[in-house]
Image (spheres, coloured by chain):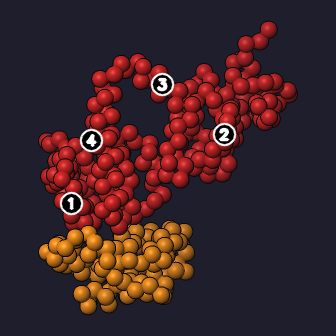
Chain colours: A orange, B red
Amino acid sequence: MTETPNISYIKELASGSDTFEEKLIGIVKREFPEEKNEFLNNYTTKEYDKAAENVHKLKHKIGMFGFEKGYQTAIDFEEGLKNNDSSLYSKFVLILESIEQFLNTI
Amino acid sequence: MNCIIIDDEETARIIIQQLCSQVDKLNVIQDFPNAIQAIKFLNKEKVDLIFLDIHMPDFTGFDFIDTLKNPPKIILTTSDKKFALEAFEYDCIVDYLVKPITLPRFIKAIQKAESATVLAKVETKTEPSLNSSSEENELYINIDRRLIKINIPTINVIEAKGDYILIKTEKQNYTVHSTLKKIEEKLPDDLFLKVHRSYIINIKKIIDIEDNSVLIAKDVIPVSRSNRPELMKRLNML
């Protein structure tokens, strides 16, 4: 995986408002682990349709942190899960872990 | 414009609020994590614009729109591009924003909402019969997120091609992601006829008929045995 997360989008959105930046990052820090866990639970219990919905929601945050190829991976993985194809799981989880680690640093 | 935001993801709601705060004309009255709460709110209050997430658990954005009698202008927000085609089936939907939403793209959507509001006001002042007659002859198709107007009487043939249809007009051909059934509903019965499971023809464009086929422009179109009697009935025969 060559892409790394960044907060360029959040900075641009904030247009200099530290309050907004902190608020948004705070919400993402709370929502992201919940969404990730929900996805992992559904995936491990082979509830692939529900897991696809989780991927759908996570996709937004993947895009927010500047992943372009990662965003496409999420799109493909979501479609794959709907067809019982889990081949992109490892690639997708790497993206989630990368974001999770990044969130601990900001 | 008074607006509300409906999205089950808090991150998305905060982002849209922030985008709205950067546009002077927008006033966010409230935001909702689900469509049911928004419906209750809209039973009491009127708004000019709704930012609506399509993909929500239990009750999708489209389900929500279907419950509204007089929907205001709606801007869809989604992480999924594939609903774009369905979105254009609703007159109230003025734009379709793919998350993560950027400010320039957001401003463009607001401009579209404003134009649509102005257009709606103009249309209510014009003669309804004039509008309807011209609309009856027009069909908008979505190709690569562009809406292209087709003058219906200029359509020669429509052919099913898997998940797509090929619309052949006098001047140009268009491949659109749709079905024969969907387009058939939009075409005037007196002009068009389904002659085969894969073909709808404009009966005014028939050059000749031979056995189980018709010639339209340079195309030989098959006519299925079951549809042939209806075709023959429609022709002004000597």
Query: Within 10 angstroms of label 3, few (less than 14), some, or many (20 or more) residues?
Result: few
Label 1 vs label 2: CA separation? 43 Å
Give the label on residue B187, or none: none
Task: Let me know if marks 2 and 3 both belong to one chain.
Answer: yes
Residue at image coords 49%, 52%? B145
Task: Let me know if marks 4 and 2 both belong to one chain.
Answer: yes
| Between marks 4 and 1 in the image, the one whose residue lies nearer the viewer | 1
Label 2 vs label 3: CA separation? 21 Å
Decide if residue A3 is on the left or right side of residue B104: right
Q: Give the labeled residue for mark 1.
A: B22
Label 3 vs label 1: CA separation? 39 Å
Residue at image coords 38%, 53%? B96
Considering the numbered disc 1 on the image, is that residue within a helix, a strand or a loop? Answer: loop
Query: Within 10 angstroms of label 4, few (less than 14), some, or many (20 or more) residues?
Result: some
Considering the numbered disc 4 on the image, is that residue within a helix, a strand or a loop? Answer: loop
Asked if marks 4 and 2 touch (Cβ < 8 Å), the reply is no
Decide if residue B201 is on the left or right side of residue A5: right
Decide if residue A69 is on the left or right side of residue B183: left
Asked if marks 4 and 1 touch (Cβ < 8 Å), the reply is no
Q: Give the labeled residue for mark 3.
A: B134
Circle 2 marks a residue in which chain?
A: B
**Identity of the amino acid at label 3?**
Ser
Q: Position of residue B128 (x, y in %)?
A: 37, 20
Circle 1 marks a residue in which chain?
A: B
